Image: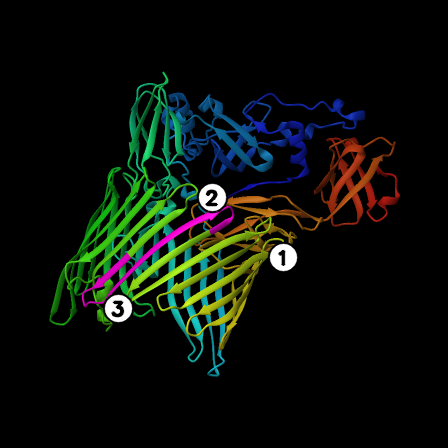
Amino acid sequence: MHFKSTRGNSYRYAVAALLGGHLASPVAAVEFDAGSLRDGTSRDLHRFEKEEVVPEGTYTFDVTLNERWIGRHRVPLQAQGHPVAAPCYSEALLKTLGVDLRRLSRETRQQLAREGACAALAVIEPQANETLDFGNLALHLVVPQQALLRLPSGYLPPENWDSGVTAGFFDYRLNLYDQKNLDQGETIRQGYLGVRMGINTGPWYWRHEGGYQVGQTSRYQPMTTSVRRDIPGWSAQLTLGDGYSGAGVFEGSAMRGVLLASDPRMLPEEQRGFAPVVRGVANSVSLLSIRQRGVLLHESTVAPGPFEVDNLYASGLNDDLEVTLREADGRVRTFFLPYGAAPLALRPGVSRFELGSGAWRDALGQTGPGFVQGSWQQGLSNHFSVHGGTWVAEDYLASAMGVAINSAFGAIGLTGFHASAAPAESYQARGQAWRLSWRQRLSATATDLSATLTRSTGPDYYSFNDFARVNAGERVDPLHWQLGLGLEQQLGERAGRFSLSASLRQNHVGSSNKSYTAGYNNHVGALSYGITFSRELRNTGEPFQTVMFNASLPLGERRRSSLSATHSTDSRGQGRSNLRWSGTAGDHGQWGHGLALVRQDGEQASSGYDANVLHRSASGELMASVSGGRGYRQATLGANGALVAHAGGVIAAPPLGESFAIVHAPHADAARIRQHVNVQLDRRGYAVVPALSPYTINTVELDPKGMSRDTELLLAAQSVVPRAGAATLLHYPTRSGREIVLQARLKDGTALPFGAQVLDAQGNELGMVGQGSRLYVRTHDTAGTLRVQWGRGDDEQCVVAYDAGAAATRSALACGG
């Protein structure tokens, strides 16, 4: 579903706004005193009075409630004995708007219960008010919160989600590679074309991905083929075909079959991710403030007694919430609430699920054992969330159970696994494993700590992926344990940031890997710099370590280019230095470029270069690079883009995201998309906005700069809430033709009435009469007749013949009967 806002409506609405202003609830008719115009140039302005601008009928309006858009709704406008038609609200419309009907009087409820009945807003809620912007087809409502149902902030009903239009697309990624070894005389040439194709039919979205490799062997490798749609009632996505299951409770697994899984993007923003419910008791009317790291997250006034705030947005930060109550007598009470989002933690009362059935799939698309799996996550309180699941296949059975704990000692996630498998004939393996994660923020020292540990009790524990690979004939070395540690320390506002991480892994057979990394980053003015030390211990026990220094400095007033340098040295005495200049060019930054000088130190010291260029446009991206050094030359050429086909034709587009929009504005071929400045409408007035956020309000605005003066945008911006995978069509009406200013007067020499309509022979409104008896019109015809009308009678209109080419030589045209 999408809604619109306008810039430059028809002349009628522009003048109506000047003369009468916005429309509101029923009031006495507003009349404009024509005598206030100079020389009495207007004889009849009735068409600009409110009762003429707002005729009775049922219209589709973009409705905002308390400054929040809640969708497009059909609203009847009725006079009901008043001189001005105003919105009339039915029982069904009030439910859609979220009004609590239980608060209405019995008489009002009985009246609204009758078929076809509706009532004015003042009758329903005396403290509410409305503003009707008829020119923009918008209805703005302000209703006290106590008169509304308690709905999550940011809630967008599924009926406002847009499924898009029937369309197909072909998204491609092309890369050509050429390398020459000058010492050995060898040349390597290869290419790769990655494709993603799709067809949208109603709520069903068909998808296919694959790749074609050209080289010593050429072949096409299909990757995934599926059809998907959302299930709004369950806030879930249904996938038939190739997908990925078990990425929450269990280890993720590629599959081919049926998958039904929760999609948190369908929820209001305040319910996505974890945030605690803040509860307390106020002794008087108090100001409630909630802060995290000094940032104000929520502020409201609460009544005496218990209060509850359950709509905090998930900040993604691990730090305590500071809750402050300022009482009516000035006393201030403060308490702290632990806020640590453990993995799989959910808000109280929120749940997620996943159910899948099919066959395991490897990286090449080959299928393995069939299975059925399901998992469930449930938020119980601010401190506890639980999760569990099961995985069933022939010769394989696994179960999982765990808890997420948010406490003063940090965010803790613990999951236990049990698996029984028969990976080979006459061999039965049973084992257990557990996964532990911990995150903590020490506010006093601005220290972030994290740790993850996965461990199995023995070599007989098989994850389903391990089991499937063994069935496929692969050799599998089951994981024994894996440990990850992290520390992030802010040293002060100007002292920089220090980080330390470690990753250790041990398999049962004995293969292991240990790596450690320490880093420091800071900046001095615009110059940012950092140093990183890493050390890796491989299976042989031989350590390999690297020290790297990097710095970056933006250049120019607009900072459209930058200079960066890196230098690294490893334990083998090999060093590498890189000095790179990069930037963008063009009015909209459509050109990107870079040039680097490279120096290799060590036994085979050498120097080299690396240059690249990138061009972005409405049709996609083109990139090229060349590099060379001692004994080699290399060149690459690439292209990324898409082709979108729909009822209006085929459009070249940049690489597409999950959801996208097709924009159509006839004759506006030079307009650009403000949100994607490199996207410009083609000569047919089409363009593709390559990426939209699903289940969220996206605004797409056209920039008319550079458009022909012969075309006028009647609509400049629209907003849409797309479903995941939708191809939304946004139509922007335009009015085209030459702008013509004519001087005309009545036959007796008097001026034409200010604000009079100017119509063509078919009765289409082309413009209006402005000051000084000038006619401002837009038309394709350079010559013809125009009808000027300023009233209802035959004596309140006249006809003027014009020739735009000769009009400049005349002092004034005569407008007669």
Where is residue 153 shown, x and y percent of the image?
40, 36
Establish if 654 lies above or below 610. above
Where is residue 599 shown, x and y percent of the image?
48, 68
Where is residue 392 shown, x and y percent of the image?
20, 60
Q: Which residue lies furthest to the bottom in this view?
A: 185
| Residue 520 among those drawn in magenta | yes
Q: What kind of element bears circle 1?
A: loop
Dot 3 or dot 1: first in sequence order is 3
Find the magenta span and give its range: 503-528
Tell me the crowding category of disc 2: few under 14, some 14 to 19, or many 20 or more residues within 10 angstroms, Cα based.
some
Q: In which quarter of the image is residue 455?
A: bottom left
- Residue on which disc 2 sits: 697
Establish if 149 lies above or below 742. above
Of tags 2 and 1, the one toward the viewer is: 2
Q: What kind of element bears circle 2?
A: loop
Residue 368 numbered tag: 3
Disc 2 and disc 3 in contact, CB within 8 angstroms: no
- Residue on which disc 1 sits: 684
Whether residue 164 is visible, yes or no, is no
- Main SS type for the magenta part? strand
Label 2 – label 3 distance at C-alpha: 41 Å
**Residue nearer the viewer, 309 or 320:** 320
Residue drawn where x is 72% and y is 40% of the image: 767
Residue drawn where x is 79% and y is 26% of the image: 38
Would you say 172 lies left or right of 329 here?
A: right
